[in-house]
Amino acid sequence: MKRIFLLFTFLLSFAQMRADEGMWLLMLIKRLNGVDMQKEGLHLTPEEIYSVNNSSLKDAIVSFGGFCTGEIVSDKGLIFTNHHCGYGAVAAASTPEKDYLKNGFWAMKQKDEFNAKDLYVRFLVRMDDATQRITSKLNNNMTGEQRKAVIDAETKAIQSENSENGKYTVVVKDFFNGNEFYYFVYQDYKDIRLVGAPPSSLGKFGGDTDNWEWPRHTADFTVFRVYADAAGNPAEFSPSNVPLKPKHFLPVSLKGIKPGDFSMILGYPGRTNRYLTSYGIQQMVGKDYPAWVEASKLAMDVMKKYMDKDKATQLNYASQYASVANYWKNRQGTIDAVAKNETIVDKQNIEAIFRQWSSQPGNLEYDGVLENISSYYKQVSDRNVERNYMTQLSRNSKYLSIAYQLGSVLKAYAEQDMQGRLAMKPKVDAAVKGVYENFNTQLEGEMLNSMVNLYQTRVNKEVASPTLMALDAKNLSTVAFSSLFANKTSVTNFILNPDRLKLDADPLLKIANGLATDQRLSTEKYAKVDDSFAKNSRLFLAGLMKAMPEKKFYPDANSTMRLTYGTVDRLPVRTDRNYYGVTDNYYTDMTGLVSKYKKGDEEFDLPQRVIDLYNLKDFGQYADAAGYMPVNFLSNNDITGGNSGSPVIDGDGNLIGIAFDGNSEALSGDIVFEPEWQKTINVDVRFVLWVIDKYAGARRLVDELKLVRGENTPPDTKTKNSGTTAEPKKTKKAK
């Protein structure tokens, strides 16, 4: 009787699932969520959010570089995204003499905007359902290889039918563990220019200490612009290109926000595993993530050692270090949150519902699926740990990846005759320049030694790469330094005098090729086991959806555009936190920002101009009606990595903030939504505009926006001597 009551309780909880949970496909909004969203405060129709034939909100949202999200905020293609999303572009543009990361950058005139190398933005043109087309040709008796062949063939056909001879990029994705398929038609723009970036003391205020924590006081934004040819079509960078006139852009609200106000986020969330079983979570937090945390911390320590010694190295590795540090804290936070929130117990309760349902007559196809999944994790546990150490080694130790990547290029080059080499040389030179552009030889030598040594120490020999296990980790850097891949100069010398025998004998290339062979053999060894797991995962989720017909299932994130909706919301107050005078825990203000200030501190320093303007209370039209200068705020939207830079939009379609982080209490959020704790941390758009206008003096950018004012919006005032180079009035020091 007790078990029946338990199952009934969980079924009821799913029927009453909060509206803020879920990352929804836009074409399904009308069918699944339109009424719910309007009840919460949405004043737009589904057609105004997603339309194929008319301009809609989706046309103002871009995938930024393939790793973040951005939003178009003017009729001249202006983009807002996060500071940490633009971090790599700003670092690449910086030099020790012109350190834009440290000091910021502002294009005071359009001609000052410059190309952000290798960046692109992607607009969603339309999406459509390909489920019936593909699944009608599949069955559960197929091998993984057979299934892949069918999906690949249909994908190729769909791409051919919709690309319009290369005008569009067409991507086919599977959803619900391979039970459904949709395709997405995109248009990519490659001429992206940096317009403005606050100094890191604002854009990264709080550093690693505040990362994933609340309260936050961070100006996490940068400004870019999309350029196109005269006809508005995508084009490579050219001085003759013009700002893009978008199909839609977001008006910017100065009305202010309060708890309960409708908020929705459109963006490109990267990856979630909300339907991961308890067995998968146990493997993740018990073995996989601890390996990730240890390896990434070691990589950070090696980078930091050399970054602290040299300004150029600091700039060259800034983006890589920030990325590794972000995931390091995320993975450790996930381990802690899973334990604290009893996530595994919650999953086991759901699995109890599935087991009861699958044991009933007519459902025997699903009986035993969970037992098969449990068996899978026992078989691959050590292999998965190896993958995590290998992932960090591959991402952070560049020597092996460079040898493998350039090895095939140089081999093809050496095999050409003189005419063929002349034709290939520009591409070869570009490849060499790209891999050695931000390269510190001593750092990479120590990174190689350290990461391989850690791999040898921690990985079970039965699943390890024989090539890596046979190496002398203490002296690997010596091997690397003697290789023709040691540095740009040695590779350039080879290009001038190519010698195929010398290439084949290169010790670093032999290691890289051996490692590649080991990884291929490992994949083949576990192919049948992985295929069986994929099948059981499909069956589990298909069965779960049948077992819980009252629940609205949403697909896991997979870097496709999604919408999440909810409200501006409070986070429960913790006694171990300082809220810096804010008594209503849904926002932070500039008083808290200045209160955290520590002169000269790497994480909590501030530009003197910010402090001077604060002391003057020069907030202008960007202040809240209550008089304070807002900085960050919370909403209960459901986001993950990839959503960084996503717009937070009110019920009328206006921009109210830019999403940039989650909170440590709910770092288990990628595998389970925590209604009480899970929040999104956003930069208040009023603070964004204050930094642009009052701090930086780049008023031309604010004048480009469509501002939506409220009844209590303060009047627009101009700061005397506005601009970062101006001398502010002398004021008393901040307390």
Image: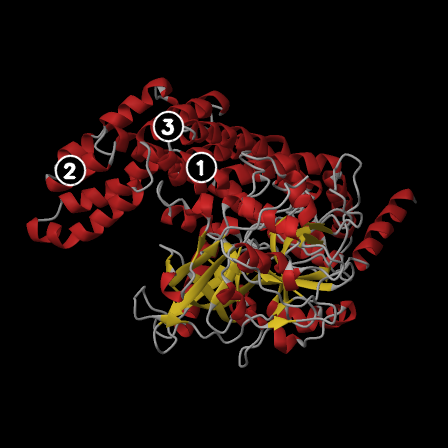
Return the x and y of residue 696 as percentages of the image width and height: 51, 55
Q: Which residue is mark 1?
A: 525
Give whichever of 541, 72 is nearer the camera. 72
Which quarter of the rendered picture does the C terminus lie within? Answer: top right
Q: Quadrant of residue 370?
A: top right
Residue at the spot x=49%, y=47% of the render? 199
Count the labels in the image. Answer: 3
Q: Depth-wise, is mark 1 or mark 3 nearer the camera?
A: 3
The amino acid pointed to by label 2 is Phe
Residue found at the very far bottom of the displayed protein: 53
The amino acid pointed to by label 1 is Lys
The amino acid pointed to by label 3 is Leu
Return the x and y of residue 574 as percentages of the image width and height: 79, 39
Q: Secondary structure at mark 2?
A: helix
Q: Which residue is mark 2?
A: 494
Q: CA distance from mark 2 to mark 1?
A: 37 Å
Label 1: how many Cα within 10 Å (few below 14, some 14–19, many 20+): few
Q: Which residue is mark 3?
A: 448
Residue at the spot x=49%, y=66% of the render? 700
Residue found at the very far right of the displayed protein: 1
Picture layout, residue 100 above or below residue 377: below
Return the x and y of residue 79 as percentages of the image width and height: 49, 63
